[in-house]
Amino acid sequence: MKILLPVDGSECSLRAVDHLITHVGWFRDVPEIHLLHVHAPIPIGRVQAHVGKETLHAYYLEEGQEHLVEAQKKLDAAGRFHTTHIHVGQPAEVIARLADELACDLIVMGAHGLGALAGLVMGSVATRVLHLAPCPVLLVK
């Protein structure tokens, strides 16, 4: 069982981590957990005049690690081995693509994230993932 666990550092995404840890007994075998943070791209044209590609790459990596640290602490404390992934792109598309590439059986994610314009019932990223995902999606409130 492969599970993709996208997090953005929001309280809701950390509740998804807690939910997975609490309910890991649902699965017959110990799941292979893939922890993911997706950073939306910064428009290169505006930044490139002031910042080099290496600096921008380092920024994405540092920001991604900062957003993953709390989730990693929770998984480590629960004794749950995990692999981390940091990607740059449109979050919903990257989540669906990585779930497909890794042949994930399930995506567990928060229903709302850090986005300023969330949907009325659930976040816009969560809604888009539901449409694009190649596997079942468990949304945690």
Image: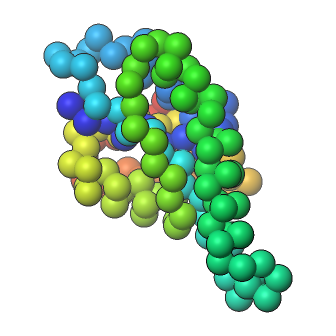
Task: State the count of labels.
Answer: 0
Q: Is residue 76 visible?
A: yes
Q: Is residue 18 visible?
A: no
> What colour scheme does the image use?
rainbow
Q: Nearer the viewer, residue 97 or 124?
A: 97
Res 46 → quadrant: bottom right
Quadrant that contains the N terminus: top left
Residue in the picture at 42% in, 63% down: 93
Judged left or right of residue 82, residue 58 is: right
Residue in the picture at 66% in, 37% down: 10
The answer to whether 62 is drawn above or below residue 137 in the figure is below
Judged left or right of residue 57, residue 90 is: left
Res 48 → quadrant: bottom right
Residue 127, percent from left and from top: 47, 52
Residue 76, percent from left and from top: 50, 19
Residue in the picture at 32% in, 35% down: 3
Residue 67, percent from left and from top: 64, 42
Quadrant that contains the C terminus: top right
Residue in the picture at 68% in, 51% down: 63
Residue 74, percent from left and from top: 55, 20
